[in-house]
């Protein structure tokens, strides 16, 4: 059974940092891109960041570029999202996803497997 399990969410003050982790099990994901998405209440699930299968390419939403960093450890079948300089508008449920491709495309339809999400709340 394929599972993606996110962890590391929580409540943080504006300007603070959090590191999200996504541990995959059931199969290896080293040959596909991994992505992070987020969904705020009443809004769509939007692309945040992604990393290619070999970690040679990364992609970020404009709203987080320069503040967030995505990385992966294929030996551990784990992907990370380091979030710095957090803002209240970063508050959302953050989801990890495994792509059908080796490049991190932004449309959520290009992702095949999804985690259950982890809540991130940023207070002002």
Image (tube, rainbow, N blue to C red):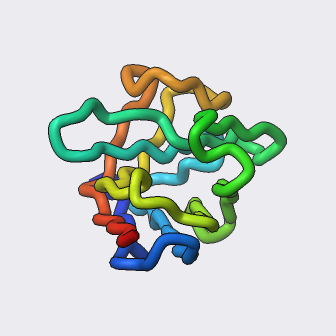
In the rendered image, the residue lying farthest to the right is 56
Residue at screen point 63% across, 34% down: 62
Above-or-below relation of 13 to 114 = below
Left or right: where 113 falls relative to 17: left
Assign the C terminus to one quadrant of the image. bottom left
Left or right: where 86 falls relative to 75: left
Assign the N terminus to one quadrant of the image. bottom left
- Judge whether residue 80 can be spotted in this image: no
In the rendered image, the residue lying farthest to the left is 42
Which residue is more in the foreground, 15 or 7?
15
Query: Residue 66 in the image: x percent, y percent?
Result: 74, 50
Residue at screen point 60% across, 46% down: 64
Query: Residue 37 in the image: x percent, y percent?
Result: 42, 43
Residue at screen point 67% across, 56% down: 67
Query: Residue 35 in the image: x percent, y percent?
Result: 52, 43
| Labels in figure, total | 0
Residue at screen point 49% across, 27% down: 100
Query: Residue 118 in the image: x percent, y percent?
Result: 31, 64
Which residue is more in the foreground, 94 or 113?
94
Above-or-below relation of 76 to 45 = below
Task: Residue 42: name its quadrant.
Answer: top left
Above-or-below relation of 59 to 8 = above
Task: Residue 56: name its quadrant.
Answer: top right
Left or right: where 61 falls relative to 37: right
- Judge whether residue 67 can be spotted in this image: yes
Which residue is more in the foreground, 121 or 107?
121
In the rendered image, the residue lying farthest to the front is 124
């Amino acid at each position: 059974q394929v599972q993606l399990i996110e962890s590391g969410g929580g409540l943080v003050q504006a300007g603070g940092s959090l590191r999200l982790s996504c541990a995959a099990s059931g199969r290896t994901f080293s040959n596909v891109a991994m992505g992070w998405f987020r969904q705020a209440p009443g809004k769509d699930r939007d692309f945040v960041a992604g990393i290619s299968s070999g970690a040679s390419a990364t992609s970020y939403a404009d709203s987080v570029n320069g503040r967030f960093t995505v990385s992966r450890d294929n030996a551990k079948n784990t992907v990370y999202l380091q979030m710095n300089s957090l803002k209240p508008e970063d508050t959302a449920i953050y989801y990890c996803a495994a792509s059908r491709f080796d490049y991190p495309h932004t449309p959520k339809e290009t992702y095949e497997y999804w985690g259950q999400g982890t809540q991130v709340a940023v207070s002002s």
